[in-house]
Amino acid sequence: MKHIYFIRHAPTIVNQTGEMVANYKEVKIQPLDKQKIYSWFYKVGKYIHDFNHVYVSNTTRSVETAQTLMSSSEIIINDALNEIDCSGLGSEKFWEIKEKRFNELVKVDLASFDQKVQTFIDRTLNLDESESIVCITHGLYVRHLYHMLTKNKANSLYKQINSVDFAFNPLDMLEVIYELPGEGKELKFSEFKEIKVYRNSL
């Protein structure tokens, strides 16, 4: 079996305000004390199999999460794990506006984004020799990925950012399990065996 784990970064103050501030990329995580770290390992982290390094998005909050929870592992920044760009929202809170207004403000080429995600997963599954691949990324990213995997095309980006049908909170984890293919064959993004979700509920 091969496992790829997608973990949402630790909580930030922006997660509470809902505002896409100008320096959103540099927003820091809120400090995790020893009790919260222990709780995460008990609820979520213990399910991760052996791994050698951690892939993270290029944001401060993803890097800090990896440094806090997996300090002994090599950290590899990969832009393919970056959040879907909703900076067009500005100071407007996504849970306070209607879908029409959201679509006017947020212009995302989802076809290109989907291709980037699929290419990253395909390449990583086949080139990374680790049994387990750990990725630290973002909430909307994983919600969208979940609906890609489950082929739920009716779930729009507006519904995903508002957690319709699938919520994914800070430090939750999505595990995608693949069976190893026969000799000469490659693993493919869409040909997974099972999806599991682990809740942190900080």
Image (cartoon, helix red, strand yellow):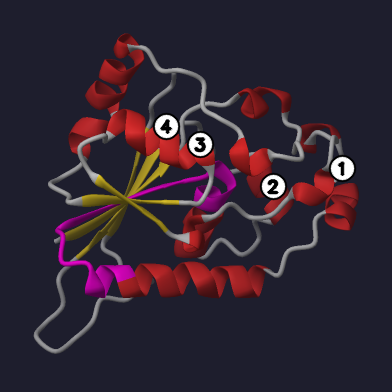
Q: Which residue is mark 2?
A: 159
Point out which mark residue 98 bears.
1
State the residue lying farthest toward the left: 183
- Side of 129 where 38 appears, left or right: right
Q: Which residue is mark 3?
A: 61
Callout 3 crowding tier (Cα within 10 Å): few <14, some 14–19, many ≥20: many
Callout 4 crowding tier (Cα within 10 Å): few <14, some 14–19, many ≥20: many
Image spot of residue 13 (x, y percent): 63, 23
Image spot of residue 202 (x, y percent): 44, 18
Please state which of the two labelled residues, at mark 4 or mark 2, is closer to the viewer. Answer: 4
Please state which of the two labelled residues, at mark 3 or mark 1, is closer to the viewer. Answer: 3
Disc 1 element:
loop
Q: Which sits in the foreground, 31 or 16?
A: 31
Determine if residue 33 is in view.
yes
- Side of 41 where 8 appears, left or right: right
Q: Are marks 3 and 4 in contact (CB under 8 Å)?
A: no
Q: Earlier in the sequence, mark 3 or mark 1?
A: 3
Image spot of residue 16 (x, y percent): 66, 23
